[in-house]
Image (cartoon, rainbow, N blue to C red):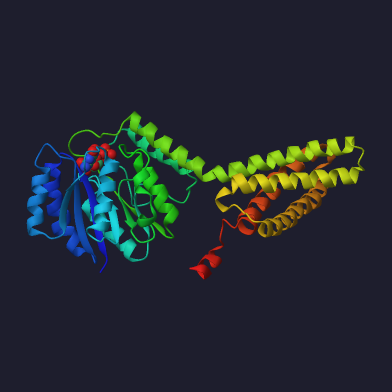
Amino acid sequence: MDKVVIVMPAWNESDNIKRMIAELVDKELPQINAEMHLLVVDNYSKDDTAKIVEEASKTRNNVHIIQQGDKSGLGWAYIAGFKYAVSKLGADAVMEMDADFQHPPRFVKPMVEAYLEGADYVIGSRYIPGGSIPKEWAFFRKFISFAGNLFIRLVLLKPRIHDLTTGFRLTRVKGVLDKMDLDNLMEPGRFAHKVHLLYQAIKNSKKVVEVPLEFASRTQEKSKFNTKEMIATFKVAIILGIKDKIRFIKFGTVGFLGFMVNFIGIRVFRGMGLAETLAWLFATELAIINNYTLNNIWTFKEAKIGGLGKTIFKFLQFNVTSAGALAIQSIFGPLGVRLVGVRFDWLVLAVVVVLMVLPYNYLMYNLVIWKTWKLPWAKKANA
Ligand SMILES: Nc1nc2c(ncn2[C@@H]2O[C@H](COP(=O)(O)OP(=O)(O)O)[C@@H](O)[C@H]2O)c(=O)[nH]1
Ligand SMILES: [Mg+2]
């Protein structure tokens, strides 16, 4: 049977944690078709939180507690909890869940079921049908939650996921959590770490499933979430969003440099008295050499091609794919001009380059030249 460990940070939650053990551990967990454990990660609470959990663990072998260590903040609690759940409890999956009933225990079951049906990452989602945020929240708070989430969704380019900031999630250990870098989590002291966890989990997951969550409002005290937390969260999202596109940005930069080399080259060779065709030919080849070299040592440095034989082969291949790009331009350029008139040749060039040549080159580089992408069926064949 699969072992699922619910990692639950708790800090001064004595009232909640007592109820949580009664409702989650004693009522909900036995109804789930997996070996369910609760791991409370305390942070030296001033109240009876630790005592209550320790007491409960004496009569239940699926209740555990650890202390977080000297680093304070929610992210650190999860790092400590995940590590303990995997290495000491042998978890097959870990869950993130709050102790304050904002994540009602009845939603654990459908999440675990999604995992048992093959999901690698399960998101308790407030923004899909069946999910919700508290009705009693003020309009502004609702707006912030929705808009902030939408912003992160856009920045990370994850249109198919509806809730990227929820605190209620399940992560498969094998192939997902064990590939995540928990030691270098951004903003582990803040709420913002959630976005970095999500980013890494999605990257390693084949199947991501969202399950509706009716997010409840906190019964006691006010939320810790504030403007500072919000800015940190956006910052993490933006950094990750850019990181993801950094290769494409480098590719674009090299392409632009290549264009400049080509442009200047024609004039230089022409000035040297070369025939027009030769001037174009040499300038184009110079641009190809420029693009190959810079992409190899910069854009695709993780997949750098070395050695004489390999370099010659790859460079020839690169010339062939570049010829393909030239062919696209010389077919669709004149075609476009015929369509909209020579007055708009610049527009035709821009459209052909942006919509056809750039995607074509990027695809060729990633698939054929530096082989950083694998087609889904190729992936299967390799595995
Ligand atoms: N171990 C630990 N738990 C924390 C810490 N801060 C918050 N928690 C717990 O994390 C959960 C979420 O905290 P909460 O203040 O409700 O955050 P919010 O719901 O995002 O406003 C609750 O179970 C808290 O008891 C911390 O520094 N250490
Ligand atoms: Mg809360």
Which of the 4 image quarters holds residue 267? top right
User: Which residue is at the front of the view, 308 or 201?
Assistant: 308
Taking the image in four quarters, ligand 1 sits in the one at: top left
| Rendered view: 40 above or below 256 | below
Q: Residue at x 16, y 59 (%)?
A: 62
Tell me residue 188's x, y (percent): 32, 40
Q: Is residue 217 visible?
A: no
Q: Residue at x 54, y 44 (%)?
A: 245
Residue 76, image x, y percentages: 28, 42
Residue sitting farthest toward the front: 308
Residue drawn at point x = 67 percent, y = 47 percent = 293
- Classify the position of the N terminus by image quarter: bottom left
Q: Nearer the viewer, residue 377 or 110?
A: 377
Q: Is residue 216 left or right of residue 193?
A: left
- The front one of 70 and 160 is 70
Residue 371 shown left or right of residue 83 in the figure: right
83 over 46 or under it: above or below? below
* Residue at the (13%, 60%) spot, across then down: 61
Q: List x then y, in percent, for residue 329.
A: 77, 49
Look at the picture and state if 239 lies above or below 372.
above
**Residue 245 in view of the camera:** yes
Which of the 4 image quadrants contains residue 260? top right
How many discs mark residues in the rendered view? Answer: 0
The percent coordinates of residue 237 (x first, y second) are 43, 40
